[in-house]
Image (cartoon, helix red, strand yellow):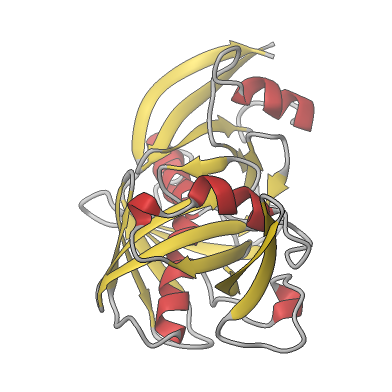
Amino acid sequence: MLVRFTKMHGLGNDFMVLDLVTQRIKVTPKLVKKLGDRHLGVGFDQLLIVEPPTEPDVDFCYRIFNQDGSEVENCGNGARCFAKFVRDKRLTGKTNITVQTANGRAQLKVHPDKKVEVDMGAPVLRPADIPFVANQQAVTYAVDLNVNGETKTVELSAISMGNPHGVLLVDDTESAPVETLGPLLETHPQFPAKANIGFMQVINRHEVNLRVFERGVGETQACGTGACAAVVAGALRGKLDMPVTVHLPGGDLQVEWRGEGQPVIMTGPATTVFEGQVFI
């Protein structure tokens, strides 16, 4: 079966986008892994699926699969690409788009300059709801790791932006131990559903550098939910004022959060790379 797709990226975080409103296929973990292979398939960090809504007051269903075939709850960079995609494909003419995700709803707004603003919802801080194993809620948590046979304790913030995140403060993102600590923390028992791990360097009260080791993917050029989680973590630690520019390897995002119970608003670009067809 020949299936149409679009390759897109948000600051280098790359996606294969499938319109399952006008075409029909069954998406399985095996198929996702096959398509995600950068040598034998299309290649991507995540596969984004556009489906008809199952609720009357939303516009689309938005599903996200990691390269390893696992389905995840949210993806901020993907949400911006999703908004551009459905407008480019004339699936909607709206500039304010409501989508349902595996973890609730997201509001997408396309600006005249083509940047997309995403209402990511309020961050979840209660450990059991992240999920994160801790006796009580705190701004930061001490997590013990076995690094090359030695016990190392790191301090991190645990936050959910519809998906679980751990955020560490580092002196310099370029020298941060992303490759070492990223996979150890991603699969740490205190994160029972695994987690995305952010390494954040505070430049000033309105600016940070960030690298993210994404759950089921590895380090990516950008992570929208990771940028939101990092800003929340920095604000909770008293180190940031709003709005904040987040510098990621792939480019910059603007993030704003006005406090507990308030939504995180993220704004950034979305880019179409090419259109294609693939046999499935």
Horizontally, residue 135 falls left or right of residue 64, namely right
Name which quarter of the figure residue 124 lies in.
Answer: bottom right
In this view, the residue farthest toward the front is 150
Horizontally, residue 183 falls left or right of residue 241, namely right
Q: Residue at x 46, y 85 (%)?
A: 236
Residue 228 at x, y percent in the picture = 45, 67
Name which quarter of the figure residue 140 lies in.
Answer: bottom right
Residue 211 at x, y percent in the picture = 42, 53
Horizontally, residue 239 falls left or right of residue 186, namely left
Residue 122 at x, y percent in the picture = 54, 77
Frontmost residue, 80 versus 88: 80
Frontmost residue, 2 versus 22: 2
Establish if 225 lies above or below 258.
above
Frontmost residue, 187 versus 37: 187
Name which quarter of the figure residue 7 lies in.
Answer: top left
Q: Quadrant of the C terminus?
A: top right
**Residue 24 in view in this figure:** no
Q: Residue at x 57, y 32 (%)?
A: 19
**Residue 58 in view in this figure:** yes
Frontmost residue, 117 versus 11: 11
